Amino acid sequence: MGIKFDMVGIVVKDMRKALEFYRLLGLEIPENANDEKHVEVAQGSFRLAFDVQETIRDVYGGWDEPTGHRIELAFLCDSRGEVDELFHKITEHGYNGHRDPWDAFWGQRYAIVQDPDGNLISLFA
């Protein structure tokens, strides 16, 4: 028996707000998904899924709001300039810029924003 990495799931408080943020990042998500309790978006060979807290509560038999950051979601941009442009686009729409774009010591252009649920989202090139 083998396993294959297939999906990353994000628990959200408000599906519409979450999907608006990820659309702003550039993900293609149909507008009619805003009222769903579970949404999946194909991303190459895996899926990014969104579930409202009520769904997760049903699946796991409970839900406690997490604290801290244990998993990073990182999105590859086409260029260093695109990192800066996307960071500014996101923050201009009222989302929190956790860390302004900078040149990381490992050679990448990097920036960090927060989604509506407080997850840190890395942008890099």
Image (spheres, rainbow, N blue to C red):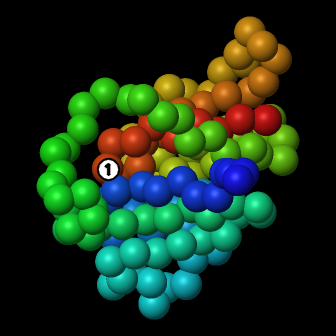
115 relative to 80 in the view: left or right: left
User: Which residue shows up at 67% across the image and 70% down it?
Assistant: 42
Percent x, y of residue 11 = 34, 56
Percent x, y of residue 24 = 56, 62
- How many numbered marks are there? 1
Relative to 34, say whether 60 is above or below.
above
Q: What amino acid does circle 1 point to?
A: Asp
For residue 104, say whether it is visible. yes
Name the quadrant containing residue 53: bottom left
Which of the pair 28/69 is nearer the observer?
Answer: 69
40 relative to 45 in the view: left or right: left
For residue 17, say whether it is visible. no
Percent x, y of residue 124 = 71, 35
Q: Residues within 10 Å of mark 1 (few under 14, many from 20)?
A: few
User: Which residue shows up at 84% across the image and 41% down it?
Assistant: 79
121 relative to 123 in the view: left or right: left
Outermost residue on the front side: it is 1
Which of the pair 102/51 is nearer the observer?
Answer: 51
- If the image is split into quadrants, where does the C terminus sit? top right
Relative to 45, say whether 79 is above or below.
above
User: Which residue shows up at 17% across the image and 59% down it?
Assistant: 61
Mark 1 secondary-structure assignment: loop
Which of the pair 2/89 is nearer the observer?
Answer: 2
In the picture of the structure, the residue carrying the numbered disc 1 is 117
67 relative to 24 in the view: left or right: left
Percent x, y of residue 122 = 58, 36
Name the quadrant containing residue 74: top right
